[in-house]
Every structure is written in C-alpha cells, then in structure tokens.
Amino acid sequence: MRLSRTRMKCPLGSIEIVATETGLCMVEFAAHAERYLRTIAARYGEVAIVDGEDPHDAVAALEAYFAGDLRAIDRLPAEAPGTKFQRAVWAELRGIPPGSTISYQELARRLARPTATRAVGAANGQNPVGIVVPCHRVIGANGTLTGYSGGLDKKRWLLAHEGAITSQLV
C-alpha cells in the first residue's frame, strides 16, 4: 500500500500528515507521530510512505483552520485504521461542532453504549487523525480537561482557539 506524507508547521509545532488515496490516516504532532506510524503499519501491513505530497490538500485546510476558519477541516476525508468500535467513536467525534465539548459519558450515550465510557475513552485516545477527528473536544464529566496525546497544553490551546474554553477548563 502506498501512503503519502507531508509535514507542516502550526501554532502548536510540527504536524505530520499521512494518507491513503482515499483519506487521512494520521494527523499528529511530530513528537508523537512514531507511535501512530507503528499502528498504521500494524493495521495496513507493508506500506510505502512517499514524502513531500500534500494528501487531500490537508495542509491548506489545516492552515485555514489555524487561521480561524474552524470548518475548513470538516471536508477532509478521514480513513483511520482501527476496529469497528474505534471507527464508530471517531465518526461520532466528527459530529461535535467547533466551539463545543462533550463528555466521554455523553459520547458513549450517543453511540448507544452508555456503560462503555472507558472503552470510548480508550478509542478516543487511539485516534490517529487528531484535530481533523476532534478528540480534543471530549472532556471529563465534571467539565475538566482530561488526557490528550499531544498534551493538555495543546488541548487547552485548541479549545481556546475554537472558543470552547471556559473558566473550568483553564
């Protein structure tokens, strides 16, 4: 399988973007990209990664997002390798609009799995298409920030950028 990869700078540092011909399979801060590249290799098997291409015009969409067009990333196709349950969680994440947050418990309820809060949290934490599949919009039931693979400082910045930050989240 052939994957395209490019890198870009954003206000939070460097981001690596990897995609198949049909969708993004990784958008991750460069410092954490190796973990996701291993996951991609495990799920897709033998892959050839071609550097220098901008898959699906992702750089332009992400630059627009960081410039304030929060919906610019909505059109990007995501094709994250994962289990059926993980893909269901990630699809539901795409329905959380910018400027909004929900709890892990609410996300589990939306998936008709109200007792699967921990499983939903685990799937959320394994999301390899960060920002585009907005796992940063999921917070604790008490309104506090909880885990984010890029670090809570990045999660806080993304939520503030989207206008979702409240005094509880600061």
Image: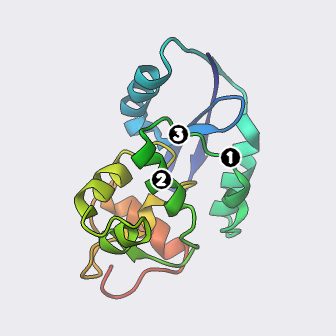
Q: CA distance from mark 3 to mark 2?
A: 11 Å
Query: What is the crowding at mark 1: few (fewer than 14 residues within 10 Å), some, or many (at least 20)?
Result: some
**Figure check: 48 above or below 153:** above
Q: How many marks?
A: 3
For the residue pair 37 and 23, the one nearer the viewer reads as: 23
Can you identify the residue that label 3 sits on? 80
Give the side of residue 146 with respect to residue 53, left or right.
left
Give the side of residue 29 with respect to residue 49, left or right.
left
Q: Amino acid at mark 2?
A: Ala
Dot label at residue 88: 2
Q: Position of residue 82 (x, y in %)?
A: 44, 38
Viewer-nearest of discs 2 and 1:
2
Give the side of residue 114 with respect to residue 40, left or right.
left
Can you identify the residue that label 1 sits on? 77
Nearer-N-terminus badge (2/1): 1
Q: Amino acid at mark 3?
A: Ala
Nearer-N-terminus badge (3/2): 3
Q: Is residue 149 visible?
A: no
Instruction: State yes or no: discs 3 and 1 in contact (Cβ < 8 Å).
Output: no
- The residue that appears at 66% across and 62% down in the rendered structure is 65
* Element at label 1: loop
Q: Position of residue 152 (x, y in %)?
A: 32, 61
Q: CA distance from mark 2 to mark 1?
A: 15 Å
* Element at label 3: loop
For the residue pair 29 and 107, the one nearer the viewer reads as: 107
Instruction: State yes or no: discs 2 and 1 in contact (Cβ < 8 Å).
Output: no
- The residue that appears at 29% across and 51% down in the rendered structure is 122
Query: What is the crowding at mark 3: few (fewer than 14 residues within 10 Å), some, or many (at least 20)?
Result: many
Q: Amino acid at mark 1?
A: Pro
Viewer-nearest of discs 3 and 2:
2
